[in-house]
Amino acid sequence: MPSRLIDSLATTDALSDVFSDQSLLQAMLDFEAALARAEAKAGLIPSRAADAISSAALAEGLDAAEIAREARSSGTVSIPLVRVLTARVQAADAASARFVHFGATSQDVADSAMVLTLQRAHPILAADHARLERTLREVSDGHARTVMLGRTLLQPAPPITFGLKVAGWVAAIRRGWRRVDSSARDVAVLQFGGASGTLAALGDRGLDVSCALAGELGLRNPEAPWHAHRDRLASLLCACALYAATLGKMARDISLLMQDEVGEVAERGGSSSTMPHKRNPAGCAAVLAAATRLPGLVAAFLTGMVQEHERAVGGWHAEWPTIAAGVQATGSALETMADLAGELTVYPDRMRANIERTNGAIFAERVVMSMTERIGRDSAQLLVSDALARSREAGTTFRDALMTMPDVADLLPAETLRTVDVPEMYLGAAETLRVQLLES
Amino acid sequence: MPSRLIDSLATTDALSDVFSDQSLLQAMLDFEAALARAEAKAGLIPSRAADAISSAALAEGLDAAEIAREARSSGTVSIPLVRVLTARVQAADAASARFVHFGATSQDVADSAMVLTLQRAHPILAADHARLERTLREVSDGHARTVMLGRTLLQPAPPITFGLKVAGWVAAIRRGWRRVDSSARDVAVLQFGGASGTLAALGDRGLDVSCALAGELGLRNPEAPWHAHRDRLASLLCACALYAATLGKMARDISLLMQDEVGEVAERGGSSSTMPHKRNPAGCAAVLAAATRLPGLVAAFLTGMVQEHERAVGGWHAEWPTIAAGVQATGSALETMADLAGELTVYPDRMRANIERTNGAIFAERVVMSMTERIGRDSAQLLVSDALARSREAGTTFRDALMTMPDVADLLPAETLRTVDVPEMYLGAAETLRVQLLES
Amino acid sequence: MPSRLIDSLATTDALSDVFSDQSLLQAMLDFEAALARAEAKAGLIPSRAADAISSAALAEGLDAAEIAREARSSGTVSIPLVRVLTARVQAADAASARFVHFGATSQDVADSAMVLTLQRAHPILAADHARLERTLREVSDGHARTVMLGRTLLQPAPPITFGLKVAGWVAAIRRGWRRVDSSARDVAVLQFGGASGTLAALGDRGLDVSCALAGELGLRNPEAPWHAHRDRLASLLCACALYAATLGKMARDISLLMQDEVGEVAERGGSSSTMPHKRNPAGCAAVLAAATRLPGLVAAFLTGMVQEHERAVGGWHAEWPTIAAGVQATGSALETMADLAGELTVYPDRMRANIERTNGAIFAERVVMSMTERIGRDSAQLLVSDALARSREAGTTFRDALMTMPDVADLLPAETLRTVDVPEMYLGAAETLRVQLLES
Amino acid sequence: MPSRLIDSLATTDALSDVFSDQSLLQAMLDFEAALARAEAKAGLIPSRAADAISSAALAEGLDAAEIAREARSSGTVSIPLVRVLTARVQAADAASARFVHFGATSQDVADSAMVLTLQRAHPILAADHARLERTLREVSDGHARTVMLGRTLLQPAPPITFGLKVAGWVAAIRRGWRRVDSSARDVAVLQFGGASGTLAALGDRGLDVSCALAGELGLRNPEAPWHAHRDRLASLLCACALYAATLGKMARDISLLMQDEVGEVAERGGSSSTMPHKRNPAGCAAVLAAATRLPGLVAAFLTGMVQEHERAVGGWHAEWPTIAAGVQATGSALETMADLAGELTVYPDRMRANIERTNGAIFAERVVMSMTERIGRDSAQLLVSDALARSREAGTTFRDALMTMPDVADLLPAETLRTVDVPEMYLGAAETLRVQLLES
């Protein structure tokens, strides 16, 4: 029974299509058809059989629920699928039925179908990544000079620019995407080995068939079957999790900046069923949900990698729900973040106001650093602490407090004192770093 | 789009029904209907409204796919569900529409619906557990005297009985079930708190409504709403994982015993798409798949428990796919193991033969222990090692080798020497332990 | 080589003692000594041997680093430990050396020692839990009437009391502790089964020795050895993770409330190496670190539970670092939170000010609810949205905006309108729920 | 308190040195000394101060336990370390003390020290990988023609060569190492950003200092500080887990082949404390323990990546124990497997015998394939099933059974029938695949 509600935040329309019964059935049938054609080319089966099998290899009309149910007794969907396909070919051209799935093993079909499916997911993720990166670059450029609080351990720290913060996100998603992209390419390998992975059932034509089959399916022909070596798939899932973690970090940042008391950015957000005044960070919630789920999915996949001998009992059988969930969750987070970023509202005034409401305390470091050379850090810190205390007590700014202290004029250049709490004067290399991040 | 193929080994027919769109929609609607009735009882809304809402609260005809899609913009399925229900009531009795979802928050509906769903899963798991326990008890009793190798670190060790091994499984699944059962009961609490969990929207009638609502739904009325405290759900998932891990241990044992070289038990098994001679441990594979996936699902749920303030952003939104997958995987492992155990073939002859093919080496410990008192462990081990070496070289049994050694007759009672490799003579407390395990 | 720096936030002084080499060695030696005494009592070995073994069973002077190194070749610390102990006894009383570790297997010693170690950790956790609960109860009582914003999805929601929030924490840690406490008691079982778990090496005295040995060590005598059934240990680790997750939720809440822009509570906190003005939520950081690590540790332990036959290869060998890390992380979070809670500063004025700065928007729900009966929810929401917009535009309060609207006077009771933004008037059942939580 | 026993299987001598207190303290001090030199070069501090700081920056004599304890109140070891270093410099040259840690933040020191530590671990892992690969290549070449059962789902399947199996391992560890190697290089970046990551405290010299500091430490100067972007470290840990999973797969295979009933290979193994006859797969156990733990450690690290703003509260604080445990576990598995592989005993006779004891059933596929073209798969399977049943009943080989069947001579070439159960005749592309794997 379908459970779209449970997965409502866990996938996208496009990706749930890619991982649907229809799509997987077709991918498995594509494998069987391509296999027949490759074997006909190698002279192993009649071309008529290849034609008959190709014609029958259409997912339409197959009963996925029934195939899934049968899979429980054999441990794989391949066996009922082959049974159904054989029956179809039998009905159309009895003599060809014997050549269905010729020389392949169940896992050949299942793995190759999953690989084909992942290849269909790849461009969907790529498009959303490109959209997200493009959007964020614009946001970063547009806010190259928008000052805001740095925040460390959720406490105010010296200022940064919003452009720098966003550039940090850009560089991280670019690193993330490079990992997803390269591992998705790495995963694009045919699985074809027959019962024990030696292609023995095809006599001396195994490698030729393998090569032709890979060509038919647009996959690389690997150095050997990889029935019990799952590192390429695992690496893709790790890459997804790394990317999703960065998206989670962004969503955490945005949801924190969107707090009413902070108010520095806002996503378009979702409404509340009871509170008309609310604009919920619904996009951030969905992204954080993905980032919450991915680490466990990665752990499950890695755990399953300890697979026995030539084909495993259990470890392999755990993979499909895990990788399908992981890729869809990543894609959901990516689409959501791309949407969200495109509609992000930024409030530079609140950013500046939040700096100002610290009354200059975040510039204490600046003063300490300026004075350290003359009087040492300990003395500098004592003096600054004194100024901060005066500022708190009198409700004045840190700068005003410093000005009331007799020694300060001797220890700080007048210009430094005058501009001590001007954020633009204490941005260090923020802009250079921002540009470097975008170029990285 | 449904993905039954991907989940083919990950659920059962019964449980996929329980977690289906239809089922969840109905559970949410049941909440809304019960809420209306409880509020009518409390005089907060007209009984006519309660009637109209109850009448409209039928999942049939709702478009789950559309609701799931809308959920992505608000972060919850509750909001589109309430919208659709309100429209239905509006059409039937416009004046009543205003009382739909009166005073509740989105998470009240969603959480209570998940709790109701889990309550429907509970008896399904219970029935399979009972069936499995019953079957295994019979197997254990039937094989109370069937000797077999103990195996430690996958190496032969002194004998046990198959009855004892199975009794160990029984005790473990009983402990496992006690945890699942008690945490499933613990989870049977209403969620109802309104926006901030204070029931403020219902004035001074909040607690009365909560109490009546719990009664309507057959749930406990908790001490307070638990929107951001998810330990009861997490505890249920942990209990599932603990149970599934025991099932995984059993499946590992069975699949190992089913190796052709061992051949001591066999599950009915699945066929192979290429190898007509094979009987695959397909049941064990499905069970091990569940045991592989559960730890990561538990980790995901625990991770999501760090939830902010009164209702969380992200942690909560990660829960549904995780708990639904975890419970279904556990149920699938349980059903599969119950089926498998009911059809397990046991080969006592192979068990005895595998003992015999060690040529008595596994009884070395027995001789060492018997001699230790007289000559100390080191000397005893030397002497035994000597006998083992003779046995290996001459291809005779350990007993025969011992008999050729002059000192042995002085150090070992004749009776001990004569029966040194009779497994029944070296079972220790196996039978008492077996009975204690079954009674525990 | 010790690595206290790496684990600086991951344990406490007391717990690192409990899991130290010294402590584990002594626990293992305690097992060996108790075993000898139990066997002497059963007449299996001379009492003189029991005395000699007991006298030699002191951890002092043993070279833990050397034992650890040797463990790598045998896969267990028990074998080198027994070797060293035997040598000691040999030196003191050669005839007794033969009775060291008599009839036990390596895992008997190792598991029982870990169980004894966990029993020593139990009261340490208990004391910190009691201290934390006591403190939080006082805080909750002291702030029963301190109003603050409810916050859902990190956005302002109708008011709660700080006492209610803290009471939610109290109830959650109480549930958490009940799980830890009961699973720690459950884990207090002897491990003693000999090579295959049948106690065969002890002839017909196995069960007597087991019973006496359990008594000597203050542990329960289990229904049977549990070498390959690890659910009790796993359940303890799950309970730790559940508790730590609640502590993580509290730390998340506190660190959020401690943001400068929110400013509602403050932990004593840590200083910064560069920023003299900062008070970092260092305690929250340590607690959140534990909550971050526990889920993965639980997953690792659960994964290792799929153990082969009578004693496992690998799954068992993964347990020690996992359970030791998990219990210590939990204890560290608990001690830190107990310290932190005892020194928490609460700022009721800021709490009220943060309510006020929403200009009454969080009471929108109250008005909608009040009007719904008369004009339906949709109309009520429209009207309220209008008032909220006026309030935002004019910079006035929601109440003032309502007052300027002609219809409102007819739809809302005057008293409701007058007090519409008084938080104390919209607390619902907060106080009752608070009391119920503390009593739960 | 040290806990070498708990970690006895979880690290190596070399790696526990690398992650020891001494080593980390020195890495942190190296950072501080290099920072001072870089700042002196930039004219920010006197060279005399750089000299004084460099001279004082020796781990010897520092009290790691005390520093670890103090770290608990500030949340980082950097603060007490800087305090201690400052005191030392103060004692030696008071005027220089003010320049200790000048412009850096705690996390700069801690992160850079961890990066330096990981760089020291890198060549240790590299050496063991190279040794393992070299050994396995020799084993593969030496057993290019050693036939053995393929085994799928732990059941006998058509033959492979041991050389092919080992070549599959080689290709997998090579892929694994490429990931570890490249991510370890990727991780070799300086952390240096000051309070908010802008280097503001160093005025306009921040980037120069950063560049010089990276040079001093032999690290890359990154495009920007990465305080809250932890993907490079996470990627390294993922790579470790992927590699360890492959090692786990190898250990699983070896431990299964080492079962007494299978007896095809043996590791040198460990002894048993009670059973003189036993040779335990102790090396496999240690490797599998690592593979069991890594997925959870990866999950923990990924979870912690959702870090707030410029520097995080909690996520960062969870990293050290996780990454140190993960790298050490991987290194331990690698060293153990390299040792184990170097001493692996292979029993080609048992491999052949295990093929023979299937009585030819594993060649059923061969016959089915040969006949399919003529009579279709279904008829072929029926005929073969019949032959298999005859073979089982009569206790003869599958070949003999086939020979008794009248139709077979017409359907199978005589040569095929004669050699139907000769493993060498049914190896397919095994040798080509083996070579391709080794060359990949």
Image: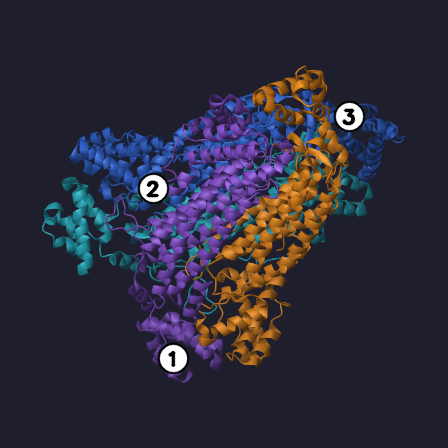
Chain colours: A purple, B blue, C cyan, D orange
Whether discs 3 and 2 lie on one chain: the answer is yes
Residue in view at x 22 percent, y 57 percent:
C359
Residue named by callout 1: A416
Q: Chain of mark 3?
A: B
**Which label's residue is closer to the chain start, 3 or 2?**
2
Residue D398, compared with residue C259, is above or below; it is above
* Res D219 visible: yes
Estimate the x, y position of residue C407 in percent, counting from the top left: 10, 48
Residue B114 appears at what percent x and percent y?
37, 36
Residue occupied by mark 3: B421
Q: Which residue is more in the foreground, D210 or A55?
A: A55
Disc assigned to residue B224: 2
Q: Can you tell which of label 3 and label 1 is closer to the viewer?
A: 1
Q: Do the residues under discs 1 and 2 have CB atoms within 8 angstroms?
A: no
Could you tell me how far apart the alpha carbons at marks 1 and 2 are, in whole angstroms?
Answer: 56 Å
**How far, Cα to Cα, is label 3 from label 2?**
65 Å
Query: In the depicted view, which residue is nearer to us: A213 or D57?
Result: A213
Q: Is residue D344 left or right of residue D28?
A: right
Q: Residues within 10 Å of mark 2 (few under 14, many from 20)?
A: many
Query: CB under 8 Å between callouts 3 and 2?
Result: no
Number of numbered tags placed on the structure image: 3
* Other residues around mark 3 within 10 Å, as few (<14) / some (14–19) / many (≥20): many
Q: Secondary structure at mark 2?
A: loop
Chain letter, disc 1 residue: A
Kindly report which numbered mark, 1 or 2, lies closer to the viewer in this rendering: 1
Under mark 2, the amino acid is Ala
Which three-letter amino acid code belongs to the residue tagged 1?
Thr
Identify the image quadrant of the N terminus of chain D: bottom right
Nearer to me, D242 or D373:
D373
